[in-house]
Every structure is written in C-alpha cells, then in structure tokens.
Image (spheres, helix red, strand yellow):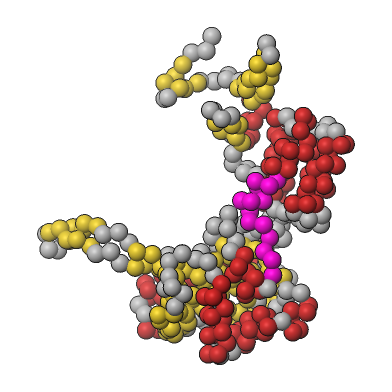
C-alpha cells in the first residue's frame, strides 16, 4: 500500500465515516491469561469514548512506510493451503463473527507474543464501498466493496498516583493509580488495499518501535520473516559502509552519500510519487563510484550488502539516513550540522594530528555567550 491508500483507509476510522459499529477483543494479563473477552458496541459508548477508541486503532496505520508500516507478502502456496492465511480469511469473511476462528487467533498470539505486562487485543471489521472517479475527478458510485479488519495490540499501563485540585469542591484530592489503554505496540490490516482494491496476497504490518519488529508475532500470524527493523538497517548500513571502503571512507564520501540520498527523498516528495521510495545495492554503488571509491572497496561493499540484506533486497533511504541531521562524533565531542551546510565541515591533518574544522563565518556562541574568533 502507498501513502494515499493508507490515508484513504485512515479517514474511515471515525464514527461518522466508517461502518465499524463494534470492537471485539480480549484483555490478557502478564501470565498470558485471558481475563476478559468482549464485544463492545460503539453505539453504547459516548461519542468521546468511541472516537478515543477508534483513534487508538487508527494508530495501527500510522508512521512511515518501510519503518513503521511494513508490507507482508504471502506466497501462493500459503494463500492456497496455509493455515495462517485460512485463519485470516475466516476472520475477514465472517466479519469477526466466527467465534472459533477468533479464539484460535487469540490463542496463537498469546502463546507466542513477547510483550511485557498486560495488553489488549483489539479487532475491528469494516466494509468500504470504494468510490470510483471520472477522468474529470468527479466522484461516482461505488464499483467495489472492500472488506477488511484491523488488529491492534495495545499495552495496558498503570498510571502514577497524583494530587489533583477540584475547583467545584475548593479542595485537593488524591487520584489513585489506574490502568489505561496505550497506543498499539504492534498490529496489522488484512487484506491490503492495493490499487484501491483487496489484495489477499498482502497484509500491512505495524510496529511502533523501529528497533523491534516482534518477529515471533509475524511468524505466528503470517508465517513470514519480517524485514530487518529500520533502526537495525541504519546501523547495519553504516557499519558496512565504514568497514568495507576503509581508507576511502572520508567525510566527503559520507557527505556525498547523505546528500544524494536526501536529494532522492526530496524529489520523491516533490513529485508526489505514490509508491514508496526504495534503493538497491546498485544505487549506492553508483554513489560510491562517483566519489572515487576504489573498485576493490566498492566490490567489498557489494559483498557485505549481499550478506547483510540480500543481493536483491531494496531498502528505504529514509531508514538509513536522517535528512534533518548530519552528525560528526568523536568519543568526547558531538557536532550536529544542518545537512544543507555540511560543506562547512572538513577534516585535516595538521602537524601529524587529526582535526575537524568548522568554518565560522557568522556569529559563534559558547554556552550561550557570543565569542570572538581572531
């Protein structure tokens, strides 16, 4: 799914927009026991409560594609005969009314999910009459009905006791600690809404923490191996780059990689391209060659890339660089530079010692005090 398709589904997760009339789920304690199994009608809740609940579920479709939102693809064999896919289809096709399928789904998650403390499993089903549009952009009658469900795994956390002031009583009162439902840690939507149509060969998986993808959950629900977490992709790429190009790994090379990848991201944004931006090993190879990195070092980079990511694996450049930050670090000093002015920084050997030089044409402050450089 691309950003437009995700946004289209997200807009439905409001009481006045979608067809979600109730939420199904269970409350699991830290001993992996279901202590409550419920079907909550939104009609019996206040508007504020139903909006709050749908807002929590909506977060399952939040974040950045490739970082927080990950495409899960089923093999043809799985779709034809896989138990995991049959269970997801049973949940979808029954509008979450198949009690046996729901209980089986709960059991699989609870048995394998590594999540500290209590949590909720929330399920929401929706049926969307997908409108079509004329060439002139005019909205036409629905041409397809897209049926899907969302699953959100939400930690339940304990608040801290606090002191509150009640104005209508003109007095202070202690507020006792209580449990509250936090934003989803993980979740998914099935099936995917690709090309504004149901794609039962794909699901969209959500993870709040880009350093942890809960592979045990992905394996249980999808029988699939998730991609490397975004934060790990960044660390791995940085390690490969530094280790393989060795003496060629100058600040100029790192600047060039950062600048060219940032430019790709910016152009993708300006052009409003629907599909997520990804780069291949060949893309980075071209950048390194343009910087004068030796052929041996480029080959070493390719080999390490193949081992770490896979020869044909494409990754999102947003996962491996921060377009808003350029950082230079030593064990004792950290310098953060506006990426658009990384040209102000250079490295140099002076009398046998290594230096990081920063051109300071304008005002310079140290601990908030303007200083004079002469």
- Residue 316 visible at all: yes
Residue at left 87%, top 37%?
296
Quadrant of the drawing holding the N terminus: bottom right
**171 in relation to 365, above or below:** below
- Percent x, y of residue 278: 73, 54
Q: Nearer the viewer, residue 53 or 122?
A: 122
Instruction: Name, please, the residue furthest toward the right.
Output: 295
Residue at left 59%, top 69%?
217
- Residue 266 visible at all: no
Image position of 9 (left or right of 290): left
Quadrant of the drawing holding the C terminus: top right
Q: Where are the magenta residues, as a range?
A: 224-237
Instruction: Name, please, the residue furthest toward the top.
Output: 374
- Tally of marks: 0
Q: Nearer the viewer, residue 246 or 254?
A: 246
Residue at left 57%, top 20%?
360
- Percent x, y of residue 210: 58, 55
Residue at left 63%, top 69%?
218
Image position of 51 (left or right of 217): left
In magenta stretch: residue 12: no
**92 in relation to 170, above or below:** below
- Percent x, y of residue 370: 44, 19
Q: Nearer the viewer, residue 164 or 245?
A: 245
Q: Nearer the viewer, residue 262 or 326?
A: 326
**86 in relation to 12, above or below:** below
Instruction: Name, please, the residue furthest toward the front.
Output: 31
In magenta stretch: residue 233: yes
- Percent x, y of residue 114: 53, 66
Instruction: Name, please, the residue furthest toward the left.
Output: 170
């Amino acid at each position: 799914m691309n950003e437009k398709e995700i946004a289209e589904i997200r807009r439905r997760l409001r009481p006045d927009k979608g067809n979600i009339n109730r939420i199904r789920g269970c409350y699991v304690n830290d001993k992996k026991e279901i202590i409550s199994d419920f079907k909550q009608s939104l009609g019996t809740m206040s508007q504020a409560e139903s909006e709050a609940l749908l807002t929590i579920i909506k977060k399952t479709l939040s974040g950045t594609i490739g970082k927080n939102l990950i495409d899960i693809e089923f093999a043809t064999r799985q779709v034809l005969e896989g138990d995991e896919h049959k269970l997801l289809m049973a949940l979808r096709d029954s509008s979450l009314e198949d009690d046996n399928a729901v209980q089986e789904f709960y059991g699989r998650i609870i048995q394998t999910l590594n999540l500290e403390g209590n949590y909720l499993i929330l399920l929401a089903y929706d049926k969307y009459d997908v409108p079509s549009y004329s060439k002139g952009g005019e909205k036409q009658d629905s041409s397809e009905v897209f049926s899907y469900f969302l699953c959100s795994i939400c930690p339940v956390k304990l608040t801290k006791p606090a002191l509150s002031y009640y104005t209508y009583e003109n007095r202070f009162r202690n507020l006792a600690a209580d449990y509250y439902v936090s934003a989803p840690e993980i979740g998914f939507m099935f099936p995917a809404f690709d090309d504004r149509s149901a794609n039962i060969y794909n699901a969209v998986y959500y993870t709040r923490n880009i350093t942890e993808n809960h592979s045990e959950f992905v394996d249980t629900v999808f029988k699939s191996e998730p991609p490397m977490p975004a934060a790990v992709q960044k660390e791995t790429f940085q390690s490969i780059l530094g280790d393989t190009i060795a003496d060629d790994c100058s600040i100029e090379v790192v600047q060039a990689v950062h600048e060219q990848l940032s430019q790709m991201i910016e152009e993708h944004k300006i052009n409003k391209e629907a599909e997520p931006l990804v780069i291949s090993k060949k893309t980075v190879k071209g950048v390194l060659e343009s910087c004068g990195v030796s052929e041996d070092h480029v080959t070493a980079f390719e080999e390490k890339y193949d081992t770490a990511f896979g020869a044909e694996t494409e990754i999102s450049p947003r996962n491996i660089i921060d377009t808003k930050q350029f950082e230079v670090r030593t064990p004792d000093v950290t310098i953060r530079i506006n990426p658009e002015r990384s040209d102000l920084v250079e490295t140099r050997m002076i009398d046998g010692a290594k230096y990081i030089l920063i051109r300071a044409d304008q005002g310079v402050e140290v601990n908030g005090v303007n200083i004079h450089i002469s």
